[in-house]
Image (cartoon, rainbow, N blue to C red):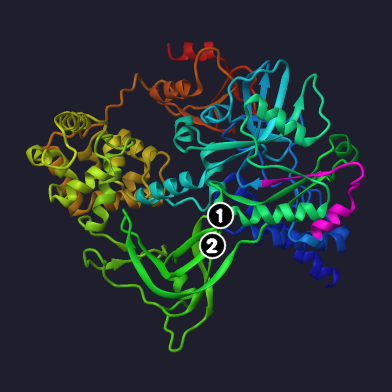
């Protein structure tokens, strides 16, 4: 490659990698697989090695991919949280081993958990702060969310200071449960457990984090006062004794041959774990020798991560099954002879949508390549061989459940059934409508709802408020106490705020926050039904997509009839929000640090109650920065921009 071509390729790779770093680390929504990313990074490293004149300080090869998220307060790490250099084959691993003096040390080998790296800090035995890795130097304070993880000890028997590093992950079972919930609620399902864990840990509301069933493995001591260790294995044993959930397996190996054998052993057992691993970590065990080896600007020289390739297998596509989701989305699923992938038998895999099938030229009878995305969700990658007379599969024109015509909007790849009474959508609609965050009707879980449907007792959402309880009593496992509890739960749900009802409708793109904004903006359901698209766009925080989706839903004849029936059953149709006054109308507040008496969510609620708004970042549009103890970079930026800074006392005086 000539110099000019190399320069252009280095620039292109750098921009692509920076983009994918943002998608992966900050937005938790990667667009490419790890192996594609690793291949680009490796190509960039090779080119920068051949043409060092084009190596820049901000190159993705010189920096950890993450960065502190503005939603959370920054934390400066006292010990840099380094990333690991990846190796992809045993020759590269042997090259690493040749640089290590095995007369001084042995190696430790442990599984590489695919999650989000965090630091936990303890003072005199009490957990007081937890943070993400970020860029390795600055992370984000996620203490409140980490407190929701049950396996993190909140108190340990240790005097002095201790900082440990671990990997927050989502168990496979919890991941599948989350994906099912997201699909039933019309949300984009998480792509893999790593991104699900990262997104769950970065929730502004710790209660959501608590619901996600996260877990953690601790794998390193970052710093410790008044105690020394000789080896890494010794530190893991010590941490286990303190009650930390350490790595499930770690082994000491005398040489690289033993290391390779253990890596193969871990790889062969990947399918038996209840969590996702994407490799094995090999470390120098002698801690003193580690110090001597040191680090590059990005990686420690005493450790590498061996990355397993995603397992792929060929099989013959026998059929394509069409499923209807809660929002009417039509999803094609490949059906094929069972194959073993990542330790489990697989006979079904997602085909995503019609565009995917056409782009890959997939037809029934073709030989296809299947893999597990993130070792969890089976997906079809490509066609390896077309069968004789193969034809690209054509998606149906009518819904397989209700025979209504299917539609696809110009800006979407998904076919949809827009019949509100479609039987395939009804159960999923009911599950969402009765869920805790929606109408919160306790006792109407999926199993009970399915019973009611099978018994022909409900045909639409409003039938829930006109149940024939004499017939309900005849259903299996329905005692008098259960029946009374159900009656009370249904009756109590009628008084829910309008925002809960709007969210319960399950309108595409309209989540809890958007539903709340609609209810507060219009005040009652009649005003919502009369609103045009431009009226929805006038809601602060709404864009065109939300406005169009809401407008289309509330102008459907089926929606208007359903709301009339719910009104007749006594369901509340008014927003219950009470505003003290609007003295803070139009004022934008940014909160930073720890306030003396108010929690951040309490301060935010007070600001909104008096007509103000909160923002996560300081800009020239910010009116006030409400600062408490340990205020970070937001305070400095406020000073630089000459934004007015107030404390809690001044804030309380403003709303007195």
- Residue 211 seen: yes
Of mark 2 and mark 1, the one earlier in the sequence is 1
Q: Magenta stretch containing residue 109, yes or no? A: yes
Residue 297 relative to residue 356: left or right: right
The residue that mark 1 highlights is 271
- Percent of width and height locating residue 31: 57, 57
| Quadrant location of the C terminus in the rendered image | top left
Q: Which of 180 and 524 is in front in this view?
A: 180
- Percent of width and height locating residue 288: 88, 34
Q: Is residue 257 above or below residue 9?
A: above
Q: Is residue 199 above or below residue 6?
A: above
The quadrant in which residue 462 appears is top left
What stretch of residues is rendered in magenta? 92-111
What residue appears at the point 53 percent right and 14 percent down from the top-left corner?
648
* Callout 1 secondary element: helix
Q: Which residue lies furthest to the bottom in this view?
A: 389
Residue 608 relative to residue 63: left or right: left
* Callout 2 secondary element: strand
What residue appears at the point 14 percent right and 44 percent down from the top-left corner?
463
Q: How busy is the neighbourhood of tag 2: few (under 14 within 10 Å), some, or many (20 plus)? A: many
The residue that mark 2 highlights is 341
User: Do the CB atoms of the residues marked 2 and 1 lie less than 8 Å apart?
Assistant: yes
């Amino acid at each position: 490659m000539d110099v000019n071509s190399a320069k252009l390729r280095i620039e292109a790779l750098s921009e692509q990698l920076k983009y994918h770093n943002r998608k992966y680390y900050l937005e938790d929504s990667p667009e490419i697989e790890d192996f594609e990313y690793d291949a680009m990074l490796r190509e960039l490293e090779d080119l920068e090695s051949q043409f060092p004149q084009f190596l820049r300080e901000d190159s993705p090869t010189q920096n950890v991919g993450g960065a502190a998220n503005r939603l959370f307060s920054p934390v400066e790490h006292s010990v840099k949280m380094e990333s690991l250099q990846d190796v992809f084959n045993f020759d590269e691993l042997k090259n690493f081993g040749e640089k290590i003096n095995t007369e001084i040390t042995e190696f430790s080998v442990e599984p590489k958990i695919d999650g989000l790296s965090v630091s936990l800090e303890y003072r005199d035995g009490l957990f007081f702060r937890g943070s993400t890795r970020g860029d390795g130097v600055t992370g984000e304070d996620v203490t409140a969310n980490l407190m929701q993880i049950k396996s993190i000890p909140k108190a340990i028997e240790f005097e002095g200071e201790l900082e440990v590093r671990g990997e927050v992950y989502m168990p496979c079972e919890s991941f599948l449960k989350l994906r099912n919930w997201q699909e039933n609620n019309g949300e984009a399902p998480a792509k893999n457990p790593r991104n699900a864990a990262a997104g769950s840990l970065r929730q502004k509301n710790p209660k959501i984090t608590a619901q996600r069933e996260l877990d953690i493995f601790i794998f390193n001591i970052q710093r410790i006062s008044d105690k020394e260790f000789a080896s890494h294995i010794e530190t893991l044993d010590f941490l286990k004794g303190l009650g930390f959930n350490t790595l499930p397996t770690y082994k000491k190996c005398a040489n690289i041959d033993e290391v390779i054998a253990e890596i193969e052993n871990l790889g062969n057992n990947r399918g038996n774990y209840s969590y996702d691993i994407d490799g094995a970590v090999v470390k120098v065990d002698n801690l003193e020798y580690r110090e001597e080896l040191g680090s590059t600007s990005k990686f420690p020289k005493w450790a590498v991560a061996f990355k397993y390739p995603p397992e792929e297998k060929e099989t013959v596509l026998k059929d394509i099954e069409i499923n209807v989701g809660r929002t009417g989305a039509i999803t094609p699923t490949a059906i094929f002879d069972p194959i073993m992938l990542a330790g489990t038998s697989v006979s079904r895999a997602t085909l995503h949508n019609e565009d995917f099938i056409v782009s890959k030229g997939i037809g029934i009878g073709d030989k296809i390549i299947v893999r597990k995305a993130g070792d969890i969700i089976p997906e079809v990658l490509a066609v390896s061989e077309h069968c004789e007379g193969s034809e690209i599969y054509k998606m149906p024109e009518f819904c397989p459940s209700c025979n209504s015509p299917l539609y696809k909007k110009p800006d979407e790849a998904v076919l949809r059934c827009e019949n509100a009474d479609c039987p395939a959508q009804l159960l999923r609609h009911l599950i969402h409508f009765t869920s805790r965050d929606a109408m919160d009707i306790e006792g109407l879980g999926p199993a009970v709802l399915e019973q009611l449907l099978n018994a022909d007792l409900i045909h639409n959402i409003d039938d829930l408020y006109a149940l024939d309880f004499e017939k309900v009593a005849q259903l299996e496992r329905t005692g008098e106490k259960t029946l009374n509890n159900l009656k009370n739960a249904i009756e109590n749900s009628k008084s829910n705020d309008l925002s809960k009802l709007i969210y319960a409708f399950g309108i595409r793109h309209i989540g809890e926050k958007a539903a709340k904004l609609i209810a507060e903006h219009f005040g009652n359901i009649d005003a919502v039904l009369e609103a045009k698209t431009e009226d929805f766009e006038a809601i602060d925080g709404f864009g065109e997509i939300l406005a169009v989706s809401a407008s289309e839903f509330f102008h459907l004849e089926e929606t208007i009839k359903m709301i009339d029936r719910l009104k007749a059953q006594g369901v509340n149709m008014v927003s219950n929000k009470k505003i003290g006054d609007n003295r803070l109308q139009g004022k934008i507040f940014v909160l930073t640090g720890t306030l003396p008496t108010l929690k951040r969510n309490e301060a935010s609620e007070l600001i909104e109650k008096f007509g103000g708004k909160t923002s996560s970042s300081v800009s020239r549009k910010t009116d006030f920065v409400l600062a408490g103890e340990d205020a970070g970079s937001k305070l400095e930026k406020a000073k630089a921009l000459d934004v007015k800074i107030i404390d809690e006392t001044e804030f309380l005086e403003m709303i007195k």
